[in-house]
Amino acid sequence: MKRTALRSLLVLGVLAVGLPARGDDPALRERARAALRKAVEFYRTNVSTQGGYHFAYAEDLSYGRSEMSDGPSKVEVQRDGTPLVGMAYLDAYEATRDGYYLEAAREVARALVRGQYCSGGWDYFIEFDSQKRGQYPYRADGRCSESPPARPDRRTTLDDNITQAAVRLLMRVDRDLEFKDAQIHEAALCALDSLIKAQYPNGAWPQRYSRFPDPSSFPVKPASYPESWSRTWPGSDYQSHYTFNDDSIIDMIDAMLEAARIYSEPRYLASAEKGGDFILLAQMPEPQPGWAQQYDRDMHPAWARRFEPPSITGGESQSVMKGLLLLFRETGKRKYLEPLPRALAYYRRSLLPDADSPSEIRHRACPTGTPCLARFAELKTNRPLYITKGTRVTALDQGTTTVDGYELSYSDASVITHYSVLVSGAALAGIEQEYRELQTAEPGSLKRPDRLHGLSPWSLRRSPAGSAPTVDRGAVANLELRIRAVIDAMDTRGAWVEEGSIGKANRLVSVFAAKEMVVTLAGKALPMRENDTLEVFAGAEPPKQRIIRTRTFAENIGALSAYLAPAQ
């Protein structure tokens, strides 16, 4: 198991089942309390850009970078950026009740308020440069009355848990501030109301939007197979499709469930249940009673990007099934359990047979002994589909060009590596176990704690239904070891620095080699192996090789907070 994954499981395990993580060593607790404050002060004071954050920074903080943005005037909203830090601050506040951490979380929420679009949600990043903000339809800048909007392509994005995570953070900060911060409260309610308007009549959501759908254009119908489908990517716009990809709809459903709790508002619960009803509609008929990554308005599995063909997915379908279990837990409605026996039976029989000589991608996605599923199963035949590897060239301000590859294949011998075409099926056993436990569970034991943690709390492993939390002294001891390691790894500033390449803002060219290639430099030939990446930067200074990673910061703050939390 990767070190970062182990850290995450340790922290999330303590938080999820309510273990009394409090240690018996007063000196260690005092060191942990001081380390928590020092780390948050460093990130809040020295790393933050007006309350927002990038994925990673150079060790000297001279440069910050994320997947979709870089530089001093932008911050990232998705995944390992701004919402993750805000939630870490809230964990620290919950553990210590020190108002300093709540004020830090308020700053993050205020940054999100400044990045909220007129359509109610958020895109991948927020621009703070006053000279550039006019290119974006930010509500805070009073641009929502413009017609047409400044940039119609600037859309609320549900991809990668962007808007869902942002609104979750706003709601949680709003609650802890007792709904007294007018800016945060209004922005949270605006986002939720807009997301209800963006929900299709059948209960689905698009991947992204700038305008609300016309209900007459989206008839409610069950999923079905198309008579035929193109084997080559048509290049069509997929952003309005009904989208499970990257768990966008499941994250939306759970965000609405949490909103219903925080605000005691029935409309939010109704929206979540409507999303659940879409899951029921979207289950494919036999012979493949699973789910697709995305559907067109005819409820046929559809193309998205050139490496996401119409198919039945072995990846997002596992999240869909977890979402159904969650909906039953939160509503008690048994209709959300009804699809699971058929789906589980289908995915069990779709597990790939063991391979004597597994491919590179098979070994990486499904280590020996791990049940394995194709991410894409061909419609009706159920044959695994793969996408062949291609050479990609990215040039400054010119976007990315694919030179070759990206064709459908039945072989996993030479396939793309930037996107998982094989996924682990290890979660299937847990899904089936939870399904069986819920059949006889007492209704009062089903719901989650009032306070939720993390970007996607629906994905955390739960205690068996009806069982009381138990004290795992071994886990507490392991947490104490982890806390000592966290404190010892901190530098004098309060930062955790690790090896890694952040790149540079002035990258001119990047080339990913899908096969062996040769680069010439000053007349000398240099080999490039398959999967190597060549990067060319302007200037003489090489990229930094030691970085400060926001994900590591959030994990360590989570561990310290779990250790300092009062005993249950």
Image (cartoon, rainbow, N blue to C red):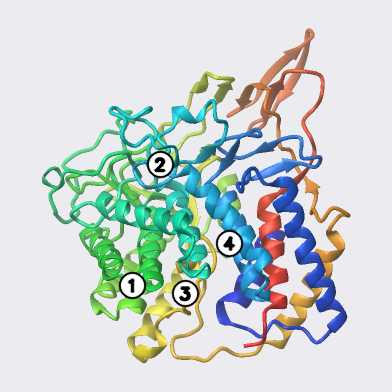
Assign the C terminus to one quadrant of the image. bottom right
Eyeballing the image, is 310 above or below 275?
Answer: above
Q: Which mark is residue 327?
A: 1
Find numbered disc 1 in the image and state the secondary structure of the residue it sits on.
Answer: helix
Amino acid type of the residue that numbered disc 4 sits on in the rendered structure:
Met
Left or right of 412, for residue 205: left
Q: Mark 4 — residue? A: 87
Left or right of 487, for residue 532: left
Question: Which residue shows up at 79% across the image and 9% down it?
Answer: 522
Amino acid type of the residue that numbered disc 1 sits on in the rendered structure:
Leu
Pointer 4 local density, CA inside 10 Å: few below 14, some 14–19, many at least 20: many
Pointer 1 local density, CA inside 10 Å: few below 14, some 14–19, many at least 20: many
Q: Earlier in the sequence, mark 2 or mark 4?
A: 4
Q: Mark 2 — residue? A: 139
Q: Earlier in the sequence, mark 4 or mark 3?
A: 4
Q: Nearer the viewer, mark 2 or mark 4?
A: 2
Q: Earlier in the sequence, mark 1 or mark 3?
A: 1
Q: Nearer the viewer, mark 1 or mark 2?
A: 2
Q: Earlier in the sequence, mark 4 or mark 1?
A: 4
